Image (cartoon, rainbow, N blue to C red):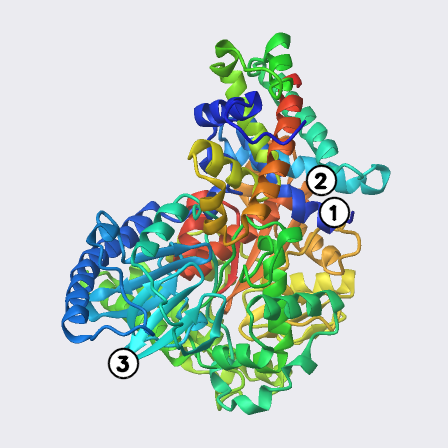
Amino acid sequence: MNQPLHDTDPFEINMRELLRRHARPEEVLRPSSASTPAKEDNRVVLLLFALAAVALLAVLAMNRNNERETDSPIVDRPRLAADDSDTTGVDPAVVTFPEGLLLLRAGESRIVSIGDEMGNYTDWQYPDLTGYTLADVREDSLLLKRNGAWYLLRYDRPSQFAQYSPKPGETFSAAAMRHRQADTSSLTQKLPALQYSDTPGLSIFQDLEQWTDVRFHLPEDDRLAKHSFNLTLKQGLTAEQYLRILSQLGPKKIMITRSPLLEEEDADPADLWVTCEDGSMQDAWKGFALALKPLLQGFAVSREEEGAARQMLDDMLADAEARGLEHDQGWESRIRCYQSLADIAMRVGNLETDPWFTNAPYETLIANLDQMPAPAAQWKGMSINDAASLICDAFAVNIICAESVCRPVAKIQNGSVAATGTGLLRDLCNDLNATFYYRGGALIVTADDDASIQDLDTYPVFAADLAPGDRHAPVALEAARLLMADDIFRRRAAAQGKDAESIGASCFLRIGNSLLFVPTFNLYGLHNRINSILYQYRTNGFDRAMEWISQRQSPVVLLLK
Amino acid sequence: MTPEKLLQEYRDRVFRWMRVGLSGNDDLAEDLTQDVFHAALKRFPDYDWSEPMALLHKMSRDRLATHYRKQGAAPGRLPEDAAAALRDMDTALLPEDVLKRAETGRAVNAALALLPAGYGEVLVAKYCEGKSVRSIAAALRKSEKAVESLLFKARREFHQLLSREAQS
């Protein structure tokens, strides 16, 4: 087949007819329904953009008038095109380019931030542009103005943002804005950007200089090191620069965006932020996270998070009391139970900063559980099953609660269990010679002592028959079998002619300081479910992720909150 | 080819193909995709993975056919002459009755679903939305030459997949 180039070519004509009549890109070009952002969210973003557009049109017009009135003509400085028709019908508030959207809020005559189509602004990738006035939008850069000086911001080199000396006779036009908007509107119907939030530990490292040798902290795993290295290259930043940006984030969200349209063989490091598929990108992030391992040792819960959680609990209690609910209706105990769980998670999550836990080995923590504050003691006095049903109600999720894994179990190794009521874990440990340990607010299940906590952040644990080399597989499979006493799962299994023991893949998933057990029949379902849960969590937060899970009726187990 | 690479590169394509074949039933598509990869990975060393997509496509078709056999109803197939017309679409214009068939639409979307990442998007931009190579290149921030190369490969791959779909 020759390459068809002309409209008289039957192949070209046939292609056009076939695709125009039948193609359903929304269905066949996206990986799964879970990856589609909520329509409501899109509407809000579009509305915001529309409002910003109206404001920007007005201010741009005003700025143009001001330029004409106050600027004397010079040959060595760019000028805005005076042709008003250039902007007719144009939405100049939003400039779309493959890695996201640039939102220009003209009401303040400045660039606000750069984000993706979901409105998640990636202002971390770019310098603070407050106070700069937009002068021109180009294919590869923005021209900005401040205090009479010109500045150039290249999309692919934001770190090189610097003052700019236009060439003699150089001109630029606001029409470029329309050009970009018109040409990319449909192509940006890409997969939503992944969002990584709540990066732990970063905010505590204020002294950047000590991390200039980050390249020497690359992980031992060559594959991960490569991902990390590539990520740094693609960003056009050195590791040191990257760290400098990250360290300024504090608790802010981190975005990594990608374009699905670039083939690897054609890839130009300047073209993309990250070129990987979803899974690979998680690898890339994981590699980078591991490169920063010294930074991630502590899993502190931020004061904001803790404050918000406590406020929510207080509100729940106040609401119950306001509605005149009697204590015997279980409201108070339910809330107290939740409070206790949150308290435990937060305290253990703040292991390295909370004076109560400072320097306390895990075994000591368990031995001293009775000394924990009152809510914890109250929690301890409840049966696991009662507590589980209360949590189930609180989060509206399908919960299968295994005795003992809901407790803040300390390090349990080779069947030597240091906490009470841990029959399940003890059995597992005995059978599998596995290690269960509790760290950072999450119960981590590994088959050896060397696994890092990041292992369970993004990697599902595959069952033995699917990934024989995976060291986690036996543990996950056995845990899945033991935990699968739930009716929902049994019904689903029966509907497919399977029994509950045919679980093919499952994993423990730590998100934030919570731990989920995700049982599925086999590999694709596991991957899809993990991605969906992570996507929901990173995009909408924990509660929305739980809500999504409950709507899907996926038998996901919330083990620890 | 490694099991990990197989999963990473092909799972979404198989899933999308299943979804087309099952008229958008995501849950069932997910389950059948699981079955395909479960089988593929379980006997991974036994297979020749020199053409992974062809093999996975065959396994997927088998599972979909099994599913429809159990259901007792399957989507209609393209007549042989229509399938031949799609196979020869690079040399002759497609008849109107072939263009408007529902089975043709299903084959088109199934082929799109199986395309590597990026191919489908660029074809849609070119043929559905009528964008020029220049505008696509600008949108992708690539050279026009790179986009032409991408389009060429996408068209070729699409044609092969469509021919296969039409005959299956």
Say if B103 sits above or below A165 in the image.
above
Picture disc at residue B17: none
Label 1 marks a residue whose chain is A
| Residue position for label 2 | B38
Mark sitting on residue A148? 3
When asked about the image quadrant of residue A537, the answer is bottom left
Q: CA distance from mark 2 to mark 1?
A: 7 Å
The quadrant of the rendering that contains the N terminus of chain A is top right
Chain ID of residue with mark 3: A
Counting from the top left corner in percent of width and height, residue A344 is at 47, 75
- Secondary structure, mark 1, is loop
For the residue pair A455 and A295, the one nearer the viewer reads as: A295
CB atoms of marks 2 and 1 within 8 Å:
yes
Residue situated in front as seen by the camera: A184 or A115 = A184
Q: Indicate which label's residue lies in the foreground, 2 or 3.
A: 3
Q: Can I make out residue B140 in this image?
A: yes
A94 horizontally vs A183: left or right = left
Tell me which residue sits at (43%, 83%) in the image: A373
| Residue A280 location, quadrant | bottom right
Q: Position of residue B19 (x, y in %)?
A: 54, 32
Confirm whether circles 1 and 3 share one chain: yes
Q: Is residue A314 left or right of residue A117?
A: left
The answer to whether residue A327 shows anywhere in this view is: no
Mark 1 or mark 3, which is nearer to you?
A: 3
